[in-house]
């Protein structure tokens, strides 16, 4: 009976071994724990990407600071240019102010004719100075057609002398500065 028992045990072992080999061949592969080398590569890649990110972030911060400095410098330069332009205009008007003072002083000591001549002289000097800076008066006279691009209608009134839409009176002259409208002419228009 022992021989029979040994034979049966041997058969059971063989069957179990065959079943085990068949099961191992059919079973899906179990994930293998990553090797130390793969972990080290992943750590190196992470460190490289983190360093690259930090480099880009630092570059972006520097670029932002440079742009802010540039913006402030341009704003400061524009303000200085504006002040310098105003300085040139004011400086060119100083002789006109001097002559206006002389005309007023002369008016106190002399008769009206000389005062009128002095004021006309100062007005001509002022006009010449402003023309030198690019100022040009709009040529608007009574009877001209109303043009909303260069005229500002202050009011309309009935007129027997002018047709509807014509300027009847110029209240304030309009001006162009370097070819651009600085101030429209203020007019009364016939209706």
Image: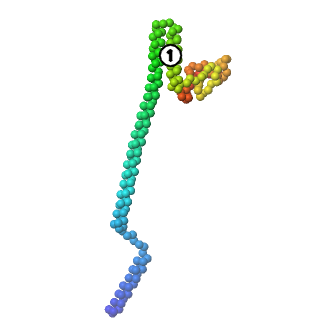
Q: Give the x, y percent position of residue 10.
A: 36, 87
Q: Nearer the viewer, residue 188 or 124?
A: 124
Residue projecting furthest to the left: 2
Q: Nearer the viewer, residue 53 or 135?
A: 135
State the residue at coordinates (62%, 25%).
Answer: 146
Would you name the residue on which mark 1 appears? 122
State the residue at coordinates (41%, 37%).
Answer: 73
In this rendering, does residue 157 appear at all? no
Image position of 117 with respect to 52: above or below = above
The reply, left or right, for residue 138 in relation to residue 26 is right
Image position of 14 with respect to 179: above or below = below
What's the image's color scheme? Answer: rainbow
Does dot 1 land on a helix, a strand or a loop?
helix
* Quadrant (top left, top right, bottom left, bottom right) of the C terminus: top right
Q: Give the x, y percent position of residue 137.
A: 56, 23
Q: Give the x, y percent position of residue 174.
A: 56, 23
Q: Give the x, y percent position of residue 182.
A: 53, 27
In this rendering, does residue 151 appear at all? yes
């Amino acid at each position: 009976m022992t021989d029979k028992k040994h034979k049966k045990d041997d058969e059971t072992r063989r069957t179990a071994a065959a079943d085990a080999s068949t099961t191992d061949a059919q079973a899906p592969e179990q994930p293998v724990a990553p090797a130390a080398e793969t972990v080290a590569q992943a750590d190196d890649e992470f460190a490289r990407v983190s360093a690259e990110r930090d480099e880009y972030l630092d570059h972006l911060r520097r670029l932002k600071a440079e742009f802010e400095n540039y913006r402030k410098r341009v704003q400061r330069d524009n303000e200085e240019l504006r002040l310098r332009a105003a300085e040139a205009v004011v400086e060119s008007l100083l002789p006109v102010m001097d002559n206006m003072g002389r005309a007023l002083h002369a008016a106190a000591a002399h008769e009206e004719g000389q005062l009128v001549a002095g004021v006309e002289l100062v007005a001509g000097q002022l006009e010449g100075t402003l023309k030198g800076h690019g100022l040009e008066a709009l040529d608007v006279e009574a009877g001209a057609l109303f043009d909303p691009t260069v005229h500002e209608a202050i009011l309309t009134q009935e007129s027997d002398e002018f047709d509807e839409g014509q300027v009847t009176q110029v209240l304030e002259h309009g001006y162009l500065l370097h070819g651009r409208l600085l101030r429209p002419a203020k007019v009364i228009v016939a209706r």
